[in-house]
Each structure stands twice: as C-alpha cells, then as structure tokens.
Image: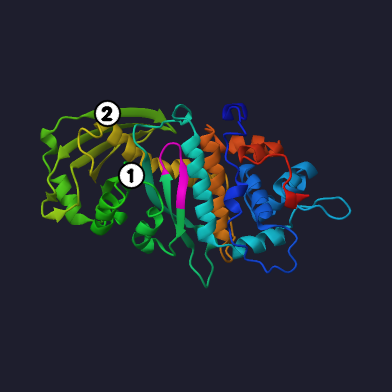
Amino acid sequence: MLVKLGPLDADRIADLRSYLDALPDPRSRRGRWYSLTAILLVCACAAVSGARSIDELAEWGERASSKELAALGIRRHLLGWRRCPSPTTIGRVLQGLDGDALDQAVGAFLADRRRTTPMAQRPGTGPRRVVAVDGKALKGSARLTSPRRHLLSAVTHRPVVTLAQVEVGAKTNETTHFRPLLAPLDLAGAVVTFDALHSVKANISWLVETKKAHYIAVIKTNQPIAHRQLAALPWRDIAVQHTASDTGHGRRESRSIKTCAIADELGGILFPHARLAIRVHRRRKPTGKRESRESVYAVTSLDAHQAGPADLAAAIRGHWGVENSSHHIRDVTFAEDASTVHTGTAPRAMAALRNLAIGTLKLLGADNIAKTTRAIRNEPERALTILGITNNPDTYGT
C-alpha cells in the first residue's frame, strides 16, 4: 500500500508546521511544557496512521522514537528523554482550540498540496474543478443536554479533499452558513454542486456574480413547484445524450442523462443564471432483487458548450460520491459516528484531523484509506514524511 503513494519529495511537499504555527494557543502561558504546534503535529501524524480516539492519538506518540518526537518539536527533559503528551493533555488542548482557525489551517494546507500536485497524478481529475457542499452530523457528540454537532464542508470531488469546514449547530442552519463557508475559497471557474437544501436564489446569485463560479443544483421533492416544473419539461422528445453503467457492491446500475436548454425564468420560478435543465434516470438491480428506477432533476448555470452531458453526469454522481469517499471513510475507518468525544471544540477538531488524513492520502494516490493507514501505523516515520515534516528538530524541540 505504501508503494502506491509513490516517491515523497520533501522539497515539493508543504510542511504542515508552518500552517499550525499561526493557531492561537487556548492555554495559559504558565505551566506550558509542550508547544501547541507539537501537540497538533502528534495528533496529525496519529490521524494519518489511523488513530480513532484521543487515547489512540497519545498511543501513537508513545510508539514514536525519540528522533521522531524531536522532529515534531517535543521538548527534551533535563534528563535527556522526550515524552509524548498524555491523553488528558491532548484532550484539554483539543477542547479549547479555535475550531475556525484549525479548519482554516487544515484547508489551506490541503489546498496548497492539491495545487502543487501535478494534474497527471490527480486521480479522476476532469477539465473543471468541482466542489461539493455537503453536511454531516457527528452522531456520537450528542448528549441529553445538547444536540449532536453538525458540520458543513466544501469538498473537491476527485480527489476528495476538504477545503473548508464550519460548524452549523443543526442541519436546518446549513443555508445560513453557505456563504461564510465558500467566501474564503477561490472558486473562479469552478463548479459547485449542492442539494436542494442550498438551492436558495440569493446564494446562487452570490455564487455566480461574486465568486465567478458555476453551479449544479439538484432539485428534490422538498421544492415541489420547481421539481414539478422540471419534471413537466418534454423529456420524452429529447434523446438520451449519455449513458454509463457499472457493476459492484452486489448490484448493477445504469444511468442515462438528458439536458434541455431553458430561459432565465423556468415556469415562473427564477433560477438565477440557469442555462440547462438536467434529468438523470437511474436503474439499479441488486442481486436477487427487483430493479428500481429513479429520476433526478437538476439545474445548472453551465451552457451546453461549457460542459457536455458526460461532464454533467460525472459532476452529479461525484456529489453523491462524497458520501462514500469522505463521510463513509470517516464513519467506518475512523469510527467517527461511534466517537463519544463531545466537550468543547474536540469533536470538530477530531473531524478536522480526519479530513487532513483523508485528503493528504488521497492526493498521494491512496485508493484504500483503511489499508494505507494500517501500513503507516507500522512505520511511524512515514507519517512525518507524508505531512512534510523533516527529521531535523526545531530550535524549540531541542
């Protein structure tokens, strides 16, 4: 699995330390032994190695050699030994962290890594950058006195890299955080995909006019008027423009797509800058079960000459693929839903560390995150190289 990551050029890989140094330290200056950057580097290396909990973050540090701890900035005791922060220390730091600052640092690191990764090495990269806006609940963070935490993320389709993340409190608050999430990102020329929850006219206008981006908005039945208007278009008179099929996971699935040019006003319902209506028809046949059929409708600001039917179909499918390529990995490989971390900003910080691990490994070409993290776990020094950390100790690590 490590061979698939390819050669790791230390001169090309950005050093994570420079992104974490700017984070504000929530601790009192009195009594500090570990720097904030050193603690977060231990957490990041442990996450790349598949750590699921705060205890496992500390356990990675206990397995690391003195040379590796020195590279992370762990101070040396007067007697000469270096000791990793305890689970209590790590938990206390994660609880008090500035969640926005941590997400911005992780997002900037991953964005720079993605920018410096050659196009030929990005798996599945298409002619346009496509970013999905999607939310995820942290189920294990709920308590009797407080609801579960809910995060909203901006994730590139292929490879899956989380560029930004904010905490929204509840799923119903996602629309109000749409602009703050995307405002810091450079989206000029990119395509943003989202579901019907974010199909708000003001947000769509801002996205196209201010951010100079395009959009693909999936319309579901929770917007009955728009869904009914799209379904009433003369789809029977339009020929199928692209088909795709695949077999796997115990089922056979085929998809066909049709597009229809529309005016700025679609049946009295205004979709700003809308150019094409899209219908994707899906057929799914699980082994030993009956075939199911479903039609999905969407609206996009892309013209027919800017994106072909195959590109539109890939973008729509890629939006749902974020569930498998990011959320599913966080829940299964990193046991995010089973995590009972709930105090302060610790749930969000742990999610940011998982985003960091998944995005970094995906950019290096890993196609199986579970196997890759297990392989790195047996070679702790590989985690440092993957995050751009050199083996030379810092001045504050001596």
**Front-lying residue, 17 or 302:** 17
Considering only order in the chain, which callout, 1 or 2, is on the residue closer to the N terminus?
A: 1
Range of magenta residues: 156-164
Q: Whole-percent x and y of residue 395? A: 74, 49
Residue 204 image point, x, y percent = 26, 53
Residue 226 as seen in the image, left or right of residue 103:
left
Answer left or right for 134 relative to 21.
left
Say what amino acid the circle numbered 2 marks: Thr
Q: Quadrant of the N terminus?
A: top right
Res. 320 image quadrant: top left
Looking at the rendered structure, the secondary structure element under dot 2 is strand
Rendered position, 118 above or below 80: above
Q: CA distance from mark 2 to mark 1?
A: 29 Å
Mark 1 neighbour density, 10 Å: few (under 14) some (14–19) many (20 or more): some
Callout 1, which amino acid? Ala
Q: Tag 1, which secondary structure?
A: loop
> Circle 2 sits on which residue?
243
Please name the residue shown 17% across and 46% down the image.
230
Q: Residue furthest right?
A: 79
The magenta stretch spans residue 23: no
Point 66% across, 66% down: residue? 27
Q: Is residue 126 above or below residue 99?
A: above
Q: Residue furthest bottom?
A: 145
Q: Which mark, by number, is residue 188? A: 1
Outermost residue toward the front in this view: 395
Q: Position of residue 73 (x, y in %)?
A: 72, 50
- Residue name at image x 73 percent, y 41 percent: 392
